[in-house]
């Protein structure tokens, strides 16, 4: 069965600092990987996705993620965090785009 | 393009009452999904549909029923609501093997 682990429940960073959110997955074949962001009281917005090809993927809002098959990881990064990035971030895996399995989320707080 | 819409946005039910949540998408997507979101648990798949007239169980289907009579609509029903079904419910849709698009959510409280 597929699964996703986001080891950090809460992360606090200062505005302008770099960010890395961790995601480890378990999947028997080549996974489709996603990062979604959820602002308070809102739905989920796709930040980026990995289906195949280049293992470093660029997303919206200046985010990027790197797929590392050997480590079963898909960590999300941003070089300089803005106060508006404060939100909850979810990593997800599937065998296509379908039947997503989500991690439990990482709550990001940005200190001004 | 409205994308994925959900009705209602908020609802309070008493234990034992029934209700139906409506999800609509205008992107002609084949696949549709219902998830529930609970604190510290991420989103969990309740039921999904791979096309009009089809439904299938997800990870947490007990206590819920679904129907997909039209391609653009996916209904989630609670026949006899329980406090354990207090949650935020999200609908999503996608084309096969593409990313899912999510609705804004329905916050349900069962007292």
Image (tube, coloured by chain):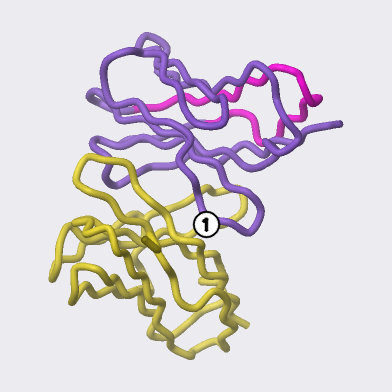
Chain colours: A purple, B yellow
Q: Residue at x 50, y 49 (%)?
A: A44
Q: Is A34 placed left or right of B40 in the picture?
A: left
Question: Image quarter for residue B102?
Answer: bottom left
Q: Which residues are magenta?
A: A6-26
Name the residue beneath numbered marker 1.
B37
Residue B89 percent across, percent down from the top left:
48, 65
Residue that protrudes farthest toward the front in the picture: B1
Q: Nearer the viewer, residue A78 or B59?
A: A78
Task: Say whether residue B97 is magenta.
Answer: no
Residue B44 percent across, percent down from the top left:
43, 53
Q: Is residue A13 above or below residue A46?
A: above
Q: Is residue B78 above or below residue B84?
A: below
Quadrant assignment for the N terminus of chain B = bottom left
Q: Nearer the viewer, residue A103 or B7?
A: B7
Task: Say whether residue A25 is magenta.
Answer: yes
Q: Is A86 placed left or right of B10 in the picture?
A: right
Quadrant assignment for the C terminus of chain B = bottom right
Question: Image quarter for residue B53?
Answer: bottom left
What chain letter is assigned to the residue under label 1? Answer: B
Residue B80 percent across, percent down from the top left:
43, 85
Question: How crowded is the residue under tag 1: few (<14 C-alpha within 10 Å), some, or many (20+)?
Answer: some
Q: Residue at x 30, y 30 (%)?
A: A32
Residue B34 percent across, percent down from the top left:
37, 62
Question: Image quarter for residue A30?
Answer: top left
Q: Nearer the viewer, residue B75 or B14?
A: B75
Helix, strand or loop for disc 1: strand
Q: Residue at x 44, y 42 (%)?
A: A102
Q: Residue at x 57, y 38 (%)?
A: A89
């Amino acid at each position: 069965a597929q699964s996703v682990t986001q080891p950090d429940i809460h992360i606090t960073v200062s505005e302008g600092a770099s960010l890395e959110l961790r995601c480890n997955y378990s999947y028997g074949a080549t996974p489709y990987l996603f990062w979604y962001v959820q602002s308070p009281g809102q739905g989920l917005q796709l930040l980026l996705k990995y289906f195949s090809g280049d293992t470093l993927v660029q997303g919206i809002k200046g985010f990027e993620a790197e797929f590392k098959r050997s480590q079963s990881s898909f960590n999300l990064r941003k070089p300089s965090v803005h106060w508006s990035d404060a939100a909850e971030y979810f990593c997800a895996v599937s065998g296509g785009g379908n039947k997503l399995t989500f991690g439990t989320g990482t709550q990001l707080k940005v200190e001004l | 393009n409205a994308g994925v819409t959900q009705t209602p946005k908020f609802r309070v039910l008493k234990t034992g009452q029934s209700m139906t949540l409506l999800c609509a998408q205008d992107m002609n997507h084949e696949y549709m999904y219902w998830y529930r979101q609970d604190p510290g648990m991420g989103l969990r798949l309740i039921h999904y549909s791979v096309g009009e007239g089809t439904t299938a169980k997800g990870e947490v289907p007990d206590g819920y029923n679904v129907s997909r009579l039209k391609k653009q609509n996916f209904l989630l029903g609670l026949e006899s609501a329980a406090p354990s079904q207090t949650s935020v419910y999200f609908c999503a849709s996608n084309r096969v093997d593409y990313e899912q698009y999510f609705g804004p959510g329905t916050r349900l409280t069962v007292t």
